[in-house]
Image (cartoon, rainbow, N blue to C red):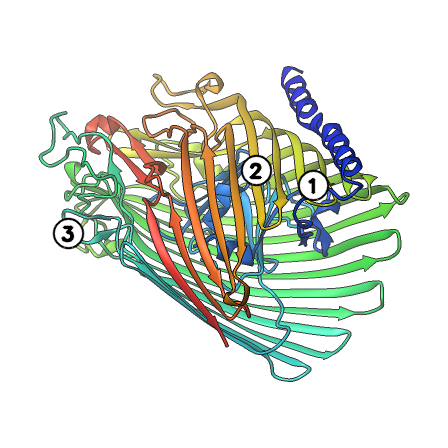
Amino acid sequence: MKTLAKAALLAGAAWSVIPALAFAQQSAGASAGGAPSAGPAVEEVVVTARRREETLKDVPVAVTAVSGERLAATGAVDITTLQQTTPNVTVQVARGSNSTLISFIRGVGQQDPLWGFEPGVGLYIDDVYIARPQAAVLDIFDVQRLEVLRGPQGTLYGRNTIGGAIKYVTAKITGEPEIKLKGSLGNYGEKDFVASAKAKVNDMVGVGLTWAKFTHDGYGTNLNTGADQYNKDVAAARATLEFTPNDKLFFRLSGDTVTDNSNPRHGHRETPALDFLGKPIAGGGVLPGVYDTRAGSGDKNHVVAHGVSLLGEYKLTDNLTLKSISAYRSGKTEGTIDFDELPQAILDVPARYNDHQFTQEFQALYTAERIQGVFGLYYLNATAAGAFDTVVSQANLSIATAGHVDTKSYSAFGDVSYDVTDQLSVSLGGRYTEDKKTGQVYRQNFTGIKSPLFGNTLAVPGLIRSNFTSSDTYKKFTPRVSVRYKLTPDLTSYASFSQGFKSGGFDMRADAILTPTSVNGYQPEKVDSYEAGLKGYFFDRRLSLNSAVFYSKYQDQQVTLQTPVGASIASQVLNVGRSHIYGAEFEGVASLFEGLSANFSLGYTKAEFDEYKALDLTATPPAIKDFADQRVFQNTPKWNGSIGLTYRLDLGDKGSLNFIPSASYRSSFHMFEVPSQLDQDGYWLLDASVVWTSMDGRYKVGVHGKNLGDETYRVGGYNFPQSAGVLFGNSVSAFYGPPRTVVVTGEVKF
């Protein structure tokens, strides 16, 4: 009751501004004869959050949409830019990687990218679900808009959208033929190049091709090998073929590929290293440069991902459209994680992953005067596999781990909206999901540095810690209901209830000796989410404002724990118990006066555990304990917000000049459920862009500065303090966000 009361007070305080805005709007109109002096109306945004095109104002879902034009104007590099401008969202490059994605929305997500463990925020490219986070830090090119759907989206998006969904939307091929070349030069040796071409070959066929290369030198150096740290070497391409034989049929065949050959991203040691006797290790001190390391596990990293999809649409009648989405994706990763960040293999983990997935979705979209709906069937067949060694040189030990998870998922879904009156609309939806999973786990001790899995054929085999195959089926129906009421033609209110579901699985690090019950796997987690919102326009549509408050009950939350025990690490994926989350979100655009507009956002999240039951391995004998009063949510700052201005100066026949300064803030947050020295204090990021555009729009030149205050801030880490009797060298390491960067871009269209 206490938390509900807090949420209600927050909602009341937030929405009390609406009558004031409405009164101010009427007063401004009256004082100026109904035509107050200000800028033009803000642009109306169209989204596909409910699998059909709707204006943002009319969607009873908390959605942030960022256009491709806005992303280009601000110099956005990849989808992690969403973190700075979207309320209550964390979108980051995963620790120890260059292109693996971690995402949290309203406190719900997953930062463990191991095969078989699935994310809590769904990622979609043109409605195709991306099952694995590797190579998912999508660079921004050939994009129409990005959409972030906050809160559970299980009804229409299904798998692993318990926290929300991120959509990367590309545009159909229309208009005149176009060739576009874009290049960038910046500090740290940045050199980027994007070439794209699109054209309608005739009335029926359209073709689009894009190739991109993104490179920059390291922000730091591996002082052991001389290799760059935090460099980038990514190539990507996308091809599209569209076929429209008549006004009822449309087909799109798309293919994309990404190759990341950046060096491994080793962390920065945060504490001095100790040997197995507890004495300092030579050269194991804390380096002054946060991007520097002394890691010795290697400088080779290779990530590749490919995908192909076929979309078919058939307009059966004026009211009914049938749609089919078929897709296949595959990926491979070869890399290494040096937990100790030292030349010695005190705690090194060479690893390789591979995965593939096939998905098929059928949709029927119905639109009538008062009824709109979508119904569908979905199928996924996926395999995620991998292997890694845990190398502990102080014990002359390597623990080999390998395995795979096969997943078959079936679901049926529907969502129907009925306009009871011109103002009142009711939506009902639901999805039934059945996931069948089979996991195979192998784990064995070897005497020697690396196991036969990674080339050491002389390693002496030892104790087999795990060697099992388990299967399970997870079934769930997730409903959604919402009520929308149009207070005025420009102002909409809504209230909704939705349920999110993420299936269970098997821990690929499971140690059947230390934790025998791990062979049974872990169970699904569930979120019940209540949300209410106000969306609309004010002052003759010169101000758009979207707001929401939410309250969620999180049950059977899946948490990954690695607890050192002797010379081993006990991995556990546990359903730890219950928690509650509540908060509020505001975002909008204001046209202040001719040539000047502002974008702003504000998010608040309060997340607390009510129950956190885990195995206490420090007890004798080990026993289950409730740690709720000692645990916190990870990657969930209480406050986050942003503000940006866009000033456009018309230069006549010399084109126009846009100046776009912005600032974003994230309050302090925790890296893990257990508070540690890796936790990050609150920080600000200051950005600015200046972009010149020719009068005909063919030429653009921009200067983009990111993190102009050169803020130093952590985005991830590994925490093994005083681990296993210091056999692991007190391995506490952190990964940091980019320093100050300045890039000059040029673009030309033919």
**Badge nearest the viewer, 3 or 1:** 3
Q: CA distance from mark 2 to mark 3?
A: 43 Å
Q: Quadrant of residue 615?
A: top left
* C-alpha gap between disc 2 and disc 1: 30 Å
Residue 525 place in picture, x, y as percent = 58, 36
Residue type at numbered disc 2: Ser
Residue shown at the point (68%, 82%) measured from the top left: 203
- Between disc 2 and disc 1, whose residue precedes? 1
Q: What numbered label is drawn on residue 478?
A: 1
Q: Which residue is pictured at 76% across the width and 28% down the height?
A: 19
**In this view of the protein, can residue 75 be seen by the observer?**
no
Left-right relation of 155 to 606: right
Please tell me in which quadrant of the rendered image residue 394 appears: top left
Discs 2, 3 touching: Cβ within 8 Å: no
Could you tell me residue 141's position as x and y percent? 48, 62
Classify mark 2: helix, strand or loop.
strand
Residue 169: horizontal and vertical position, in percent? 58, 59
Q: Residue furthest top?
A: 2
368 relative to 121, above or below: below
Instruction: Look at label 1 and name its amino acid.
Output: Thr
Pointer 1 local density, CA inside 10 Å: few below 14, some 14–19, many at least 20: many
First along the sequence among labels 3 and 1: 3
Q: Which mark is residue 601?
A: 2
Does dot 1 land on a helix, a strand or a loop? strand
Question: Mark 2 near mark 1, Cβ–Cβ under 8 Å?
Answer: no
Asked whether the viewer can see residue 672, the reply is: yes
Residue 731: percent from the left, percent from the top? 24, 33
Along the viewing direction, whichever of 56 and 236 lies nearer the viewer: 56
User: Mark 3 = which residue?
Assistant: 225
Binning the other alpha carbons within 10 Å of mark 3 as few (below 14), some (14 to 19) or many (20 upward) gives some
- Front one among 634 and 193: 193
Mark 2 residue crowding within 10 angstroms, few (<14) / some (14–19) / many (20+): many
